[in-house]
Amino acid sequence: MSSRPAASSTGPSKARSFVFLCVVTAALHAAYSAVRVLVSYRALDLGGDAVAIGVITALFALLPLFVALQVGRAVDRDRAGTFLQAGLVLTALAVGVITVSGNLVWLGVGNVLLGFGQILAMVAAQGFVPVLAEPNSLDQRFAAWTLSVSVGQTIGLPVAGLVSAWGGGARDAATTRALVALLVLLVLAAPLAFLLRNPATTAREGDEGPQSLATMLVIPGMGPAVLSSLAVLTSMDLVAAYLPVLGEEHGFTVLLVTILIAVRTGSSVLSRAFLPLLLRHVTRARLLVSATLCSGVPMALLPFTSSPVVMGAMLAVAGFFWGIGQPLTMSWVVGLVTDRNRASALGLRLTGNRIGQFIVPLGASAAAGAAGVGSVFLANGALLLGSAFVTWSSLRSRLSSPSD
């Protein structure tokens, strides 16, 4: 079966294109991870509470709910470069809107735009990965690409914290400085995004055309894969959105909270860096189950301590296993469909993620309003453990095998 080249004949090589893709991805996720935390502080400064934060957090996933699969279809038609560039531009616009927002309505608008830019950029970037991968190297390529995601998150949060702390002043001024710094980072990454070309279309043997949503959903393993990805990504979002609220209750500074979240992302960097080695000693099925099973307990226990050291240890454990889960669910869904439907399957996976990112924060805001912010983390732990059971049920025949 033939495959598409990564770029036109005048474009960069596959190896160079993958480096460009990883650098742009790191810059984008530095912005996404830091802005999501800064939005929570911005909401608090504008008079919002835990309920308002839950609603604004849910707005991030509103448009992606309706467009992720369509974006995947377009990327499958060889428009990955165009959508990556559009996503970066829209992300920069969203950060600008959030920076100048003077009320909760405009803050919500900025978060909607941020979510739209993120879905365009991430479906396109994930669609590039299989094109730039050699046969039988999808796990390794997705591990390397998600490593760039974690590197960006690890860089973005401390930079935002340090910039916000530099110069003193009121917290709203501090968050504005951090947002401007992230906007500059996106501008610096833009030239590399525009060097990535749309993959050139070539005929492929056995190409069966696009698979419908219904066809993909009934493929054995697709539902559990989407649920596992949803549980992990939603958990990351809840940490970003509600750790500032929990930290506020304990008197933590913005810098301390960003450091705690950076510990989570840093442990994801570690697990993704060692994922190829882990795959040589542990089956993919066992790693997929561990991604949610071993992160559910520390999430449920997080509200029961006020020690930043203990919190950091719990977040490190959760982050390590989340770092394993995301790349493996990507290669899981890609392996369930034909080559022509890879980006569509990734779009379906992201649609599931956004359903979780929209519904769970709304439920979390209601829980936080009624039972306090600690209930958010308890519910999060239950979601992760439930997903672990579903994954185990789907893969149990492979769990007893010595290899995948």
Image (cartoon, grey):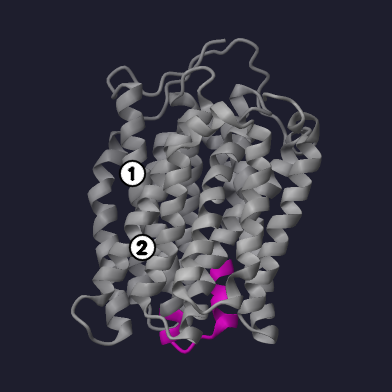
* Secondary element at tag 2: helix
The span shown in magenta is 42-59
**Residue positioned most to the left:** 167
Of mark 2 and mark 1, the one earlier in the sequence is: 1
Res. 224 image quadrant: top right
Crowd around label 1: few <14 · some 14–19 · many ≥20 (10 Å) = many
Q: Which amino acid, mark 1?
A: Val
Residue occupying image coordinates x 50% and y 23%: 137
- The residue where tag 1 is placed is 24
Q: Is residue 95 left or right of residue 402?
A: left
- The residue where tag 2 is placed is 157
Asked whether residue 108 is in view, the answer is yes
Residue 189 rendering spot, x and y as whole percentages: 27, 47
Res. 237 image quadrant: bottom right
Asked whether residue 77 is in view, the answer is no
* Secondary element at tag 1: helix
| Frontmost residue, 280 versus 119 | 280
- Tell me, yes or no, whether the highlighted magenta stretch contains residue 225: no
Q: Which amino acid, mark 2?
A: Leu
Q: Is residue 377 left or right of residue 94?
A: right
Residue 67 rendering spot, x and y as whole percentages: 59, 49
Res. 370 image quadrant: bottom right
